[in-house]
Image: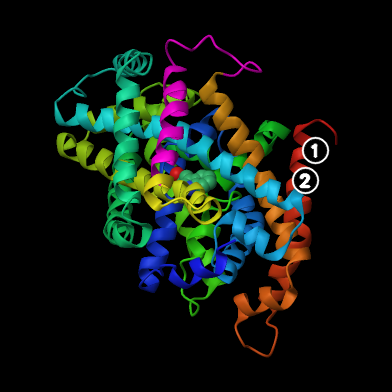
Amino acid sequence: MNHNKNSKSRAVFGTRLGLIATTVGSAVGLGNIWRFPFEAGVHGGGAFILCYVIFIFLLGVPVICCEFVLGRNSRSNYFGAVKHYSSNGYWKAGAIAGIIASLMILSFYSVVAGWTLEYLFQSLTGGLSLQSAEQFHERFTAFSTDALRPVLWTALFLLANFGILIRGVTKGIEKISNIMMPMLFVILIAFCINSLSLPGARHAMDFLFQPDFSALTPSVVLGALGQAFFSLSLGLGCLLTYASYFRKDVSLARNAVTVASLDTIVAILAGIMIFPAVFTFGMSPAAGPALVFEVLPSIFTRMEGGALWAPLFFALLVLASLTSTISMSEISITYFMEERGMTRRRATILNTLIALVFGTLCALSFGPLSNLKIFGLTIFELFDYTSSNILLPLGGMLIAIFTGWYVDRRTVRTELLGERADTPVWYRVLIFLIRFIAPAGILLVFLSALGLI
Ligand code: TRP
């Protein structure tokens, strides 16, 4: 529609560091610090983590490259980008599914970010000075099942998200990310060192890094695939939308590898921080979404200067969540603006309202709505499962097929290689991964999870 007009006036990220920091800012978030440890715990540790790392590099990196190519080349929103290369309605429907998935993720993600705000508040007001693991468990249960507090925190978080988005992406985010990502990194390493001195550290290392292949069921493998895509912000046009703000002179493939590597390191660090405490304090690694919120306070109370570390950590986690929700909101906002002709203000309001309604339902599904089950899952679980384990990998598969088979080869080549005349080996490998391995790999994981192979 008004693609050309928009592409001229589109903003561009300023520096290479800013570009990496914002993309890593999108990737690093609750997915690494909250979802990765709890999924690894539920799925038995080592074997899950091994699959996760393989999926990140074998399937994740190629699909990141695809999103980067499509975004920077079309300089457009997800739907607009697909439309740019194909008029086929099925592809466009795929883009719309991605946009809906982004709103689903934003909804449940904001609930967990709201929990983080509560814990930031508690850590500042002395509410985390309990002692035993049971007390922390009871504290979290009482809070998360409450009918009001989680909803209020979710709303507050969405308001902060709104406040940044309304100013436009390239203004504030680049600066926040540049400072925050390195800080989060340093503080995580400090926590890991502390956790490694706990008596349960040995047990935790075995749990994390000694794969027990008998635990490898199809649903574990699907969980690892979903987690890989979730953590990389991959499969629904998020990185595509960010890449539409990239300058022409940055190397897409190199950035894809950098983002994937940093994201994986942060997730592994989160595991090293959490699991020694889990085994030391006799908690269950399979506690699910509550895991990190019950374990972290126990770590802080036993740490020297914990009263200072705790608020710092939760504040950084809130910021890391914000840089992620900003990126996922941008998917629907750019769609509303560029395809539906809305102003940024209107588009941002609509995005926030949708997330507020569904976020409230997700927040309540731990308490008043906990008996409302669809396919045996609460609303929160349904949103999380459907988007992460089904829509993201499926979207990633379509993006790989689209880029590998439908988009003009020269376009893909120019975006990835520039004007270079020779064809390096890594490029051949990458194209092979995009055309064959990524689609087939994802399909195989699905078929096995469905019990068909
Ligand atoms: N990757 C982010 C995290 O790990 C979450 C996220 C941001 C995301 N944007 C996304 C997940 C787009 C899926 C799709 O916290």
Q: Is residue 169 left or right of residue 398?
A: left
Q: Quadrant of residue 126?
A: top left
Three-letter code, disc 1: Leu
Amino acid type of the residue that numbered disc 2 sits on in the rendered structure:
Leu
Does residue 47 appear anywhere in the picture?
A: no
Q: Give the magenta-colored segment's residue range.
A: 348-377
Respond yes or no on whether mark 2 lies under 8 Å from ligand 1.
Answer: no
Residue 412 percent across, percent down from the top left:
67, 73
Q: Position of residue 228 (x, y in %)?
A: 57, 46
241 shown above or below 269: below
Q: Quadrant of the C terminus?
A: top right
Q: The residue tagged with tag 2: helix, strand or loop?
A: helix
Q: How many marks?
A: 2
Asked whether the viewer can see residue 195, the reply is: yes
Looking at the image, residue 93 lies above or below residue 143: below
Q: Residue furthest right?
A: 453
Q: Quick check: is 360 in the magenta stretch?
A: yes
Label 2: how many Cα within 10 Å (few below 14, some 14–19, many 20+): some
Report x, y in % for residue 326. Answer: 40, 48
Could you say whether the residue bearing mark 1 is in a helix, strand or loop?
A: helix
Residue visible at 47% across and 40% down in the picture = 205
Q: CA distance from mark 1 to mark 2?
A: 6 Å
Image quadrant assignment for residue 359: top left
Relative to residue 201, is residue 57 drawn left or right? right
Task: Pick the residue in front: 428 or 166.
Answer: 166
| Residue displayed at 66% across by 51% down | 396
User: Mark 1 near mark 2, Cβ–Cβ under 8 Å?
Assistant: yes
Please give the label number shown on residue 447.
1
Q: Residues within 10 Å of mark 1 (few under 14, many from 20)?
A: few
Give the quadrant of residue 416.
bottom right
Mark on residue 196?
A: none
Residue that badge 2 annotates: 443
